[in-house]
Amino acid sequence: MSPALLYIIKAAFYIAAFYLVYSLFLSRDTQYARNRTFILVSVAASLVLPSITIQTGNPVNFPLFGRTLNEVLITVDRSRTGRIMTGLSIYQVLLLLYVIGVVLTALKMIFEFRGLLKIIAKSKSKGNRLITLSGLRTTAFTAFGHIFINDSLPPEVAGEVMRHEQNHLDKNHFFDIILMQFIKALQWFNPFIYMFDKALREVHEYQADEKCINTGTPVSSYQRLLLNQVLETRLFSISNSFSNPTLVKKRMIMMTKERSGLLANLKILMVLPVVAVVMLAFSSCGEKAKTNGSKKTEIQSTGTSAQPADSVNKAKTGEAVPAGDVAPPPPPPPPPPPVSKADTANAPFVMVDVMPEFPGGDQGLMALVAKNTRYPEEAKKNGITGKVIVRFAVETDGSIDKIAILKGVDPLLDAEAIRVVGTLPRFKAPGLIKGKPVAVWYMLPINYKLN
C-alpha cells in the first residue's frame, strides 16, 4: 500500500475515533467552549497523528501486508511469443478515485466561496458588516466577517436575529467552518467528518443562543422567534444560519438544560485510551520470517517444493517438465523451531519511515520483471493461467532475500516467479526507521494470461 493511501486511511480512523468519543461522552454537555475546542483539535490532530508510528516490541505476522507493487501482466498466445505489460494495482485505482473526490469537493467549496464574495462585493457599504438582501432563502447567516439578513424581516425580529448573528462574528465561528470544509475535502469519503461538521455547527448555535439569553432575552420569546423561522432553508453550506431547521429541536432543548459542572470536563480523558488503541492498530512492526503454521503454501527460493529439484531447475530455465518427473508431494514438514529474540530483532518490517529505493523506482523494478519473465512452455501447452503473488524482503544492504510464494497457481508458474525475483539487482538504498536501516517486506503480483 502506498504511503499516501495509508496516511488517508489512518486519518479517517482517527476522525472516527475522536467523533465516537465526542458523541458518547461530550455532546450532551453544556460546556460549549470545551466541545468546540475538542472538535477543532480532534480534526487537526487527525491530520498529524497518522505521521506518528509506534514501534512495537514483538513483530506481528501479517502475511498479506508489506509494500505491494503493481501487478505485472504476462500475456501470450499459445502459438506465438507473447507480450508483457504492467497494470494498475488496486491501490493506485483507489488513490485515483480519492484524488477525483478531493478535486470535486474542493471545486464545490470554491464555487460557494466565490458566490459569497460576489455578494459581498456587490452589496456591502464601506465599513458596514451588515448586508441586507431581498429574496434571501434564509432568515440570516454570517460569512467572511459579514452578517447577511433577509430584508423582509420585521424590525423587532431583525434586531434579535442580528444579535444572534453578531455572536457568531464575535466568536469567529466562520473560521471554524472554513477549517472543517478543508478537512471535508480531504476526507470526503468519510461519513464521520460530516457528523463532526454537523456537531460543530450545533455548538456554534448553542453558543450564540446562550449569549443572547444571558444578555436578557427571555427563553420563551427566543424560542418563539426560532420556531417562526424554522421553515426557512440555508443558502450556503459554508455559513452559519439562524434558522437551520435540522438544529432547532436540539437548540430548544439545550436552552433549558441544566448547565454541566466543571467535573464534566474530566470526560475528555476518555479520548486517551481510544487514541492509544488506534495508534497501536497502526503500529510499525516486524513480520516473522516464518509463518508458524500458516495455511498458505510458500516456496522458498532455497528450499524444496512439491517438485523434485530437477523439475524446478527445468522450470527456472523455461524447459518443459515431463509428467513423469513430477514426484508426489512430500510429507508435511515438522513444526518450525521457535523464533529467537535475535531472529525477531532482524525480522523484516511491514511499515517503515522511508521505503527502500530501487534503481529507476518502482516502475524500473516492474519493467525489469516484465522484461525478464518467461511464460513456461509447458504451462502454455496445458493452458495454465493465474495470478502468483511473490513475497520477498529487501535487506539492510539492499539485497533481496526470503523469496516466497504467498499465493501460488502452479509449480511451473510459481518457480518462474521465484526465478525472476531472484534475478533482481540490489536496491540502491534500504528501508529506514528513525534513520536506521531495516529489512522490509515486498509483495509482487504476477498475472499469467493466455490469449
Image: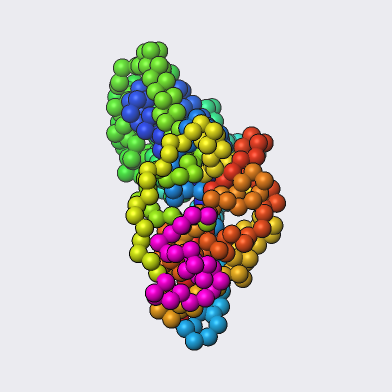
Q: Which of 179 and 111 is in front in this view?
A: 179
Looking at the picture, the colour scheme in use is rainbow
Q: As drawn, is 43 to the left or to the right of 125?
A: left
Q: Which of 31 and 240 is in front in this view?
A: 31
- Residue at the spot 43% in from the left edge and 55% down from the top edge: 298
Quadrant where the C terminus sits is bottom left
Where residue 413 sits: x, y (%)?
47, 68
Q: Can residue 36 be seen in this view?
A: no
Q: Is residue 257 visible?
A: yes
- Residue at the spot 52% in from the left edge and 67% down from the top edge: 313
User: To which quarter of the image does residue 432 belong?
Assistant: top right
How many marks the image carries: the answer is 0
- Residue at the spot 40% in from the left edge and 16% down from the top edge: 266
Up the image or down, 302 lies above or below 187; here it is below
Where residue 124 sits: x, y (%)?
60, 43
Where residue 138 sits: x, y (%)?
41, 44
Where residue 14 sits: x, y (%)?
45, 36
Up the image or down, 315 lies above or below 339; here it is below
- Residue at the spot 49% in from the left edge and 54% down from the top edge: 303
User: Is residue 309 a member of the stretch shown in magenta?
Assistant: yes
Up the image or down, 221 lies above or below 243; here it is above
Which region is colored magenta? 302-325
User: To which quarter of the image does residue 32 belong?
Assistant: top left
User: Is residue 436 a member of the stretch shown in magenta?
Assistant: no
